[in-house]
Amino acid sequence: MPIHEHPTLAQFLLQDKRSRGAFGTDLVQLLLDVAQACKAVSRTVAGGSLRGVFGSANAVNVQGETQAKLDVLADEIFRERTEFGGHVAAVASEEQEEPVPVPQDYPRGDFLLLYDPLDGSSNIDVNVSVGSIFSVLRAPRPGEPVEAADFLQPGARQVAAGYAIYGPSTKLVLTVGSGVHGFTLDPVLGDFRLTRPNMTIPAATKEFAVNASNSRFWEAPVKRYVEECMAGAEGPRGKDFNMRWIASMVAEVHRILVRGGVFLYPRDSRPGSRKGRLRLMYEGNPMSMLIEQAGGLSTTGTERVLDIVPDELHQRVPLILGSAEEVERIQAYHRAGPEPVIDTPLFNARGLFRTA
Ligand code: AFP
C-alpha cells in the first residue's frame, strides 16, 4: 500500500494540522498516545484465554457492574499510555469513580481525556467484537490542578472523539472536528493506516439496532417506532427493516458509520434505566460527535445529546443515534405524544408480537 494512499495516523493528523491549523501538535501527540493505548489493549484482548485474561476481576466498578479482568487491564493501559506524555491534566474512566490527575512528577497538559477502556465486556469471553471509546476536552484552567467539575462540559465542547474496535481487524475511527476518518491497524508494521476517509452516514436506512427484549419497558414513542419497523412493508413504513443487536455499542456505531442504521438505547421504566443505560461523558458524547460529524443525528429522544450540560461524571443518558431521517422520525414521535399502537394482524394491543 503506497504510503500516500494510506497515510499513517501521524501523517494524517499532521497534514490536517498543517492544512487547517485548527489544533496544535499537543493534540496530535495525545491522539497518538491514545492510539498506542488502543494497540496495547488490542493485543491484550487478542491474548484471550491463552494469557489468562478472561473472566471476572472479582471487583465491582463505580457503576455497580462486575469488572472483567480485561476491564481493569485496559483501564491501566489507557492511563499509563496517556498520562506520561505531558498532554493531559487528568483522565476520567468508566472504571474509576473520580478523575485521576497526572502524577505530580509528570508535566500537566492542557487536555482532559475521558474513556471507556473496554466497551462490550460482556462479549469478551464469547469472542465478539469489543472496543475502547475516548473523548478529549480542553482543561478549563490550563496549568492549574484539575477539579472534578472541570470535566462537566457539554459534549459540544469536545475537541476530538473516537473509538477503537477490536474485531477481525483492529480499527481506529476518530474526528478532530473535520469529518470522521477510519484507520486500520497494519499488524506487520504496527501503524494505523487511513482506510476510510470522510465516513458519512446515509440519511435513510432499513436497519435498526435495539435490545428488543426490553420492549415492555419502553416509552410509547420508541414502542411505536420499533413496532412500525417490525410491521415492515405491510405496515405504515411500507418497507421491510432488518434488526441487529451485538450488545457492543462500538460495533453498532461502526456498522452505522460504514453503512447507515439507527441505534437505540432509550430510557425505560426499569429502576436502573430511567435515565438510560449508557454513560454520557465517555460513551454518549464521543459517539454523538462522531455521528454528527458523519452527517447523522444523536438525541435522547427530546434533546440533542451534545447540548446536555452534565451534572455528574458517570451520569447516564438515553441514546438514539444514526441515520438522520430515522432519528428525526423518532424525535417527531416524542414530540407528537402518545399514539395508538398500530392495529395490524401481526400485533395485538399489548406488545410487539402476536401472543396467539
Ligand atoms: P458492557 O460493557 O457491560 O458489556 O455493556 C456494553 C454496553 O454498554 C454497550 O456497549 C451495549 O450497546 C449495551 O451495553 C448492551 O446492553 P444490554 O446488555 O442491556 O443489551
Image (cartoon, rainbow, N blue to C red):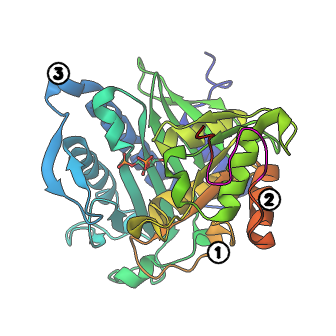
Please indicate whether residue 87 sits to the left or right of residue 335 in the image.
left
Which secondary structure lies at badge 2? helix
User: What number is the disc on residue 328?
Assistant: 2
Which secondary structure lies at badge 1? helix
Kindly identify which residue carries mark 3.
Answer: 50
Most foreground residue, 77 or 21:
77
Q: Amino acid at mark 1?
A: Asp
User: What number is the disc on residue 307?
Assistant: 1
Work out how far the residue at label 3 is from the one at label 2, CA to CA, in angstroms.
46 Å
Please indicate whether residue 344 sits to the left or right of residue 230 in the image.
right
Please give the range of residues in magenta. Answer: 342-351
Q: Are marks 3 and 2 in contact (CB under 8 Å)?
A: no
Q: Nearer the viewer, mark 3 or mark 2?
A: 2
Q: Position of residue 319 (x, y in %)?
A: 58, 59
Most foreground residue, 227 or 56:
227
Which quadrant of the figure contains the C terminus?
top right
First in sequence, mark 1 or 2: give its number: 1
Q: Amino acid at mark 2?
A: Glu
Q: How many marks?
A: 3
Which quadrant of the figure contains the N terminus?
top right
Q: Position of residue 166 (x, y in %)?
A: 42, 32
Residue 343 counted in the magenta span: yes
Image point 76% across, 36% down: which residue? 206
- As displayed, is residue 84 above or below residue 48? below
Q: Residues within 10 Å of mark 1 (few under 14, many from 20)?
A: some
Residue 354 seen by the camera? yes
